Image (cartoon, rainbow, N blue to C red):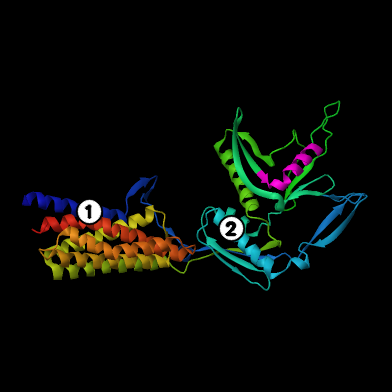
Amino acid sequence: MKTNKGLKITLIILLIILISIISFVGIYIQNKKSMINVVKDYALGMDLRGGRVISINVDKGTKTIYYDKDGNVVDTEQKDGKKEEVLINDESSLTTENYIKTKEIIEKRLNSIGIMEYDIRLDEQTGKIVVQIPENDSTDSVVQYIYTTASFTLEGENGEVLLDNSNIDRVRVGYSTLETGTAVYLNIEFNKDCIDKLKEITNTYIATTDEEGNQTGKQVTLKIDDTTLMTTSFNKEITDGVLSITFGGATTNVETLNSNIRQASNVAVLLNNGRFPVNYEMDKNRYILSDFTSEDFGIVEIIVVALLLVCAIVLAFVYKKNGILVGIANIGYVALLLILVRYTNLFVTTDGIIGVFVTIVLNYCTSIYLLNKMQKATITYKDVILKMLMVLIPALIIGITLCFANWMPIYSFGGTIFWGVLLTFIYHIVITRNLLTDSTKNK
């Protein structure tokens, strides 16, 4: 019986050592001429990794409008036409209310594309907006959501605006499998009041051909921010209020298909969250280094290891054999927690690191509580666990609540508390319990 107990304890300790090596050191494999760690790295927040700072200003410039000889707006200068210089932003639109609305639209766009961590500041007097977002592979594509006006117009041949942003209900990306491959569509769904209007437009701008096969029907132009997306006539009447636009045509190439999906999705995000009431221009787009360096991370690691060693020594001195076993178990707990943080994709911020320290302290206090209670022969392990829940459940609820925060530092802190408390409960039942019950006569 003693041999079985000793073997079980040995196996648990070996498992803890293995987990600790994986967490603190990593698993390295040969990759060409170098060794790489296959253990997932931490997802660091802006305060630890650095970020991109984008500042945009209200556009105070002018634009040139061209007219043909009949006074219709055209895209280029005409020989018999005229041109006019107008302000890009009318003075009446430069209000605090519009600046605030623009800021809100940027926040909606960032939330729509899943940017959880960002900082946005507005100067209500000048309208200047400064946004800080994490630096990663997609940052360059995210920047467009910060300064693009997203002004949508469907225009007739004389420049008349037939439909605009105010007529859009929602925009969705669709797919269709054809013989030549997969086609990507941008489906613009107009509100109910515009169903008849779109039906009338498609009948007015219907595609027709002459006897020689040349297209003679009138065409509409779809523009976003005065950039022509397409010019076309309609092949049939649209009765459901949904205008479908093909992006790139059908393809079997995965890279091309992903590019088409990405372009269509970008436009969908912009149109679904509305247009800026004020036109902006890019001011600055720069990368900001984090104040934390690799040396700082090294110091944090040293502090964690030092705390674990001090705690293990104290437990060994006070509780002898059981204290040594619990000290070893606590090291395994920290190692497993750090792995859990990595693989749950939890963003680690300065507040998240504080959350890790809080859970380590909470786990240490729980360990002492278990040791004290299990020394009493009248107290069973089940009773200890039930009493332990009275402390851990409130902490778990706090962690869950903070996870719903939109501010990344609070979310990071809440996430580490949630996973730390949950792991504390499970770890003590699976690991610590077996170490203690197999090393003592009290079952």
- First in residue order: circle 2 vs circle 1: 2
Residue 235: x, y in percent? 75, 33
For badge 1, the amino acid type reads Val
Q: Nearer the viewer, residue 195 or 337?
A: 195
Q: Is residue 288 magenta?
A: no
Q: Position of residue 327 (x, y in %)?
A: 20, 63
Q: Is residue 80 left or right of residue 120?
A: right
Q: Is residue 196 magenta?
A: yes
Frontmost residue, 323 versus 195:
195
Mark 2 vs mark 1, CA separation in Å:
44 Å
Q: Residue at x 59, y 56 (%)?
A: 109
Name the residue carrying label 1. 430
Q: Quadrant of residue 123?
A: bottom right
Seen in the picture, residue 96 relative to 416 is either above or below; the reply is below
Residue at 49% over, 62% down: 406
Segment tinted magenta in the rendering: 188-204
Residue wearing tag 2: 108
Helix, strand or loop under label 1: helix
